[in-house]
Amino acid sequence: MGRLLLIAGLGIAVFGVLLMVGARLPFLGHLPGDILIRRGGGSLYFPIVTCILLSIVLSIALNLISALLRR
């Protein structure tokens, strides 16, 4: 149980660091293909291309980490 809590805590810490660093990247979330709808007094934003790009990058990174840990 202790090991699980430690891994979960480290995962949350890494996620927090990524959120802090991600906010400073000017292009992240404003890529061509992201949908922004502004009508009246509100707006709706769908970062579709950003999500796809992050998914690809994270998939490659996790596959590399998984391959390195299997050795």
Image (cartoon, rainbow, N blue to C red):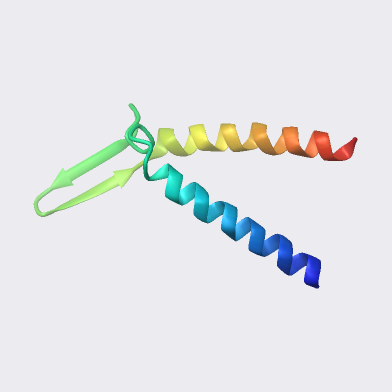
Q: Is residue 7 above or below residue 27?
A: below
Instruction: Indicate left or right for 8 with 49 as reference.
Output: right
Instruction: Indicate left or right for 26 with 52 as reference.
Output: left
Q: Quadrant of the C terminus?
A: top right
Residue 21 image-quadrant placement: top left
Q: Quadrant of the N terminus?
A: bottom right
Q: Is residue 62 above or below residue 19?
A: above
Instruction: Indicate left or right for 60 with 32 as reference.
Output: right
Q: Is residue 16 above or below residue 51?
A: below
Residue drawn at point x = 76 percent, y = 66 percent:
4
Q: Position of residue 8 (x, y in %)?
A: 68, 63
Q: Position of residue 51 (x, y in %)?
A: 47, 39
Instruction: Determine the residue located farthest toward the left in the rendered image.
Output: 40
Front-most of 44 and 58?
A: 58
Front-most of 64 and 53?
A: 64
Residue drawn at point x = 51 percent, y = 37 percent:
54
Instruction: Determine the residue located farthest toward the top in the rendered image.
Output: 32
Front-most of 62 and 5?
A: 5
Instruction: Determine the residue located farthest toward the bottom in the rendered image.
Output: 1
Q: Position of residue 13 (x, y in %)?
A: 58, 58
Residue 56 image-quadrant placement: top right
Q: Position of residue 17 (x, y in %)?
A: 51, 51
Instruction: Determine the residue located farthest toward the right in the rendered image.
Output: 71
Residue 50 image-quadrant placement: top left
Instruction: Indicate left or right for 33 with 1 as reference.
Output: left
